[in-house]
Image (spheres, rainbow, N blue to C red):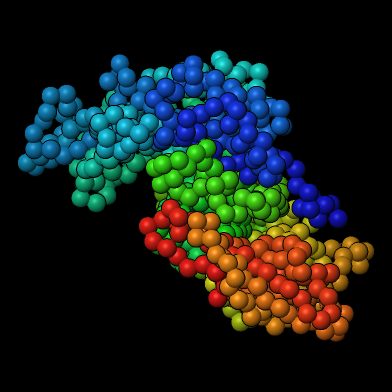
Amino acid sequence: MNLLEMLHSPGDEYTPIPFWFLNGNLSSQEIVRQMEDFAAHGVSGVVLHPRMGLPKRIKYLSKAFFSYIRTAVETADRLHMSIVLYDEGMYPSGSANGQVVEGHPELASEGITLTRKVQPGDEFLAEAGDRFLVARKTGGTMRGIHWDQEDGELNAPLTADLLNPVAVDRFIELTHEAYYREFPEYFGNTIIAIFTDEPSIMGRNVRGMFAWSHNFAEDFTQAGGRLENLPEMFFGRENDDTRLYDKLILKRESEVYYGKLSDWCANHGICLMGHPHQSDDIEAERYFHIPGQDLVLRWIGPEKSGIKGMDSTMAKCSADAARLMGRRRNANECFGACNADNNPWQFSGGDMKWYLDWLAVRGVNLFVPHAFYYSIEGKRKGERPPDVGPNNIWWPHYNLWSSYMRRLSCLMTDTELHAPVAVLCRNRALCPDVVAPLFEHQTGFQYIPESYWNDCTVDEETHELILNGYRYQAVLNDTENRFPQAAHQVTEAMADVQCFPAAPMLRVSHFMRGGVECWFLVNEGNRIIETTMTMPGVTGRIGRYDLWNDEACRQTSLQSEDGAQIRLSLHPRQSQLFFLCSEEEYEALPVPPKMVWLPKPKFTLVGRNTFECTRTYTATMEVSAGDLAEGVPMITFDGYDMAELKINGQDAGVSFWPTHRFPVKGLLHEGENEIEVTMTGSLANKYGIRAVPYGVR
């Protein structure tokens, strides 16, 4: 079947495209070496990200800087890799490492504040009791690329006014136009996109202010706004004027910043990529050719709920925006500083698998791992760790990870989502409490932001909401009762699958891919899910595919009045794809192998290397002829973190999360067998602030 063939060998377009921190004393030879190493590990694209740690000899956008970028671009061209340029030095985007404001102080970011004293340079706006509402420069800064440009330091670059078209034009001239002058022949082929990173209107380290800009007072009052009512924002109160303010700020930011960047990229044959400032900034996504978001700082994680809080909406934010706009891809800058227990570098393979599945089941189909470090020398290793690529313990086996990300991306691209529920939302208000029950009951939904409401209609006969040819059987969060004739109630029949007993930690995405009806399942919890799963209305044969192991087989199912029933057993960190197939396709699939679960080995510690964070264990295992004849022998054991197994001196594979499971068919023989396992622990033991356990349990 074409779907399985695509998933077995997904093309380079589905590659992960990691941030590559250009954070060291760059050399052309080392750039080439690292890129060749990336390609050898299944990584066919990178984001060239100037980063804290560049030496002063490499000034941002200087001749020396571009010489190294040229080496990277030309190497990528030779290796058939893709390049995503990064539009800043370092972040948030929009200031060209302070060069926009340099010599042009009038272009610095602005805000409004309440003050008891009007200072020189302030723009008086209104009286507010014993205080005054004024506009002034924020003093906001960004993180730069040299060690003396960190937040709060004297040389931290000032941020530009992203609501001022003059400032944004200067930013584009300094960055985008400079890149195009250097590499015009690579735009639209090797260079596929420019990444803009969480642009911040006021910059970092700003307190007690709200965004503002030159001439914005005129726009506000012409739209009917009353400046004297804006001080209510400082006390957390809303009124018609504060709501108008929010609307106009979003409009100005969208048109002046995102709109200009989007148009420039389109006119130069590449995509605007990256993500807006906040996880639920859904309206800004319309300007991205590849909408995106940013999973960072362990805002969510395996030990927390994946469906609570503003940040739990980010994956659906980008995926649903892309679907509304007809974009094939949407991206996530994932894993950045996602350390467990606030312990730098404490990030396991099990964590990484959880995050990938969390994103994919919500529709993300382009992964931007944060980050591969050019250098971890000195304090570089502590700058937003961990390195999730070449400087981590799994790099020798990274082809397993890059292949999995490719398969997820391939699976979730060009899909037609089954989403019977429409969830109306506003920018920065994606209602996590409203959608949480939909996740827990495996019911597909589509966010519809405010800018699309006027395009919706209601079928008078079926009471379905219609948008862009899609029909929604229920509407949630219609607080203004805009669609009173539309069906509002979510019913059990709308679920993608029905589980008995209920499985609130099971996530399901139901879609058509390449003409094949699919259900992608993820266990988002930390316990095994055991349930009987009914696929409503489904008849016919079902296949199963394990994306991690690249294994397909027949799936046993029973036909009931309600649909096909499957006895589901899904372990933590496990994902499965179920798909409908014809009788002929079903017969061509292998019969599920019988697993022979061998007794857990009794390991003895025989060696340790504290510097490498490894411990080696051995055991002997007596195996009978019956064990070898009945099916696939499985060796299982518990332990942290990465397990590499050998059977009688032969490699038996690697496992990244417990319970470690190794199919060892063909490696055992009748009688006594020698087993060796090397457990490699988290690099928190080398670079963190506290040691964490590792080894066999």
Residue 184 appears in the figure: yes
Residue found at the very far front of the displayed protein = 606
Q: Which residue occupies 35% across, 25% down?
A: 98
Residue depicted at 66% across the width and 63% down the height: 644
Q: Position of residue 429 (x, y in %)?
A: 42, 52
Q: Height in image: 565 above or below 297?
A: below
Q: Is residue 275 left or right of residue 14?
A: left
Above or below residue 670? Residue 251 is above
Instruction: Report how many numbered discs are placed on residues in the image.
Output: 0
Task: Compare residues 649 and 547 and report the one nearer the observer.
Answer: 649
> Residue 28 location, x and y as percent?
58, 26
Residue nearest the viewer, comparing 381 with 271: 381
Can residue 572 be seen from the camera position used here? no
User: For this view, does 164 lie left or right of residue 657?
Assistant: left
Q: Can you say whether 293 is above or below 464 in the image?
A: above
**Image: 604 above or below 207:** below
Could you tell me which residue is drawn at 68 percent across and 69 percent down? 676
User: Could you say where residue 486 lies in the image, as x and y percent from the top left?
Assistant: 56, 59
Residue 136 occupies which quadrant of the picture? top left
Tell me the quadrant of the picture where the N terminus can be found: bottom right
Residue 120, picture quadrant:
top left
Q: Find residue 394 and report its image quarter.
A: bottom right
Residue 216 falls left or right of residue 615: left
Using residue 622 as the reference point, say whether residue 175 is left or right of it: left
Q: Quadrant of the C terminus?
A: bottom right
**Which sits in the foreground, 402 or 180?**
402
- At 76% from the left and 82% from the top, the residue drawn is 622
Residue 185 place in picture, x, y as percent: 66, 18
